Image (cartoon, grey):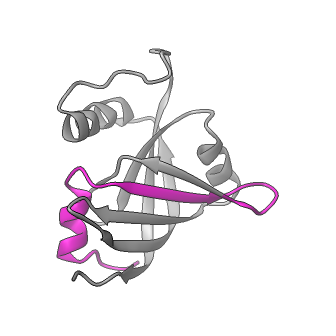
Amino acid sequence: MTELPGRLLALLEGPSPCLLATVNPDGSPQLTQTWVDTDSTHILINTVQGHRKLKNIERDPRVAVSILDPDDTASYYSVRGTVTSTSTDGARDSIDRLSRRYTGEPYRSYSGNDAEVRVLLTIRVDAIIAQPWG
């Protein structure tokens, strides 16, 4: 596992744009914009049971994550990692915390389905590439 540098931790703890790449069954990439968090060791992403990215991860846990500096999106970290855990434990609290960080409001289901099952992905960081800041 690779240690997370301070600047990356700061981006993960703020409302930073994030892109998650998974691998579809046919080998093609699947890319999703998402909110992101950290436990100071791993990258945490919250998703919904039944979504394509979760199905892909259940089949192949390798992912790529890009976390962009919201003040300068040309500056970002690109991470290769492995999803080591998918859990519903704490996922509902996590999405509400993320919503408040990103929108300033409590979470509202964008699908309109308040019964959706939230899933928290824990990603072990295997490699980091930092795009230099200007």
In this rendering, the answer to whether 30 lies above or below 108 is below
Q: In the orientation shown, which residue stands out farthest toward the right?
A: 26
Q: Is residue 50 left or right of residue 68?
A: right
Q: Is residue 42 left or right of residue 26?
A: left
Q: Position of residue 90 (x, y in %)?
A: 34, 35
Q: Which residues are magenta?
A: 1-29
Residue 55 lies in the magenta-colored region: no
Residue 18 lies in the magenta-colored region: yes
Q: Is residue 7 left or right of residue 116?
A: left
In this rendering, the answer to whether 70 lies above or below 64 is above
**What residue lies at 44% left-to-right and 72% top-to-bottom?**
79
User: Quadrant location of residue 78?
Assistant: bottom left
Q: Is residue 87 left or right of residue 131?
A: right
Quadrant containing the N terminus is bottom left
In depth, the one of 86 and 62 nearer the eye is 62
Q: Position of residue 72 (x, y in %)?
A: 24, 67
In depth, the one of 66 and 92 nearer the eye is 66
Q: Position of residue 96 (x, y in %)?
A: 27, 30
**What residue lies at 34% left-to-right and 81% top-to-bottom?**
131
User: Quadrant location of residue 52?
Assistant: top right
**What residue lies at 33% left-to-right and 34% top-to-bottom?**
95
In depth, the one of 104 and 80 nearer the eye is 104
Quadrant containing the C terminus is bottom left
In this rendering, the answer to whether 79 lies above or below 91 is below
**What residue lies at 27% left-to-right and 34% top-to-bottom?**
99
Q: Position of residue 60 (x, y in %)?
A: 67, 60
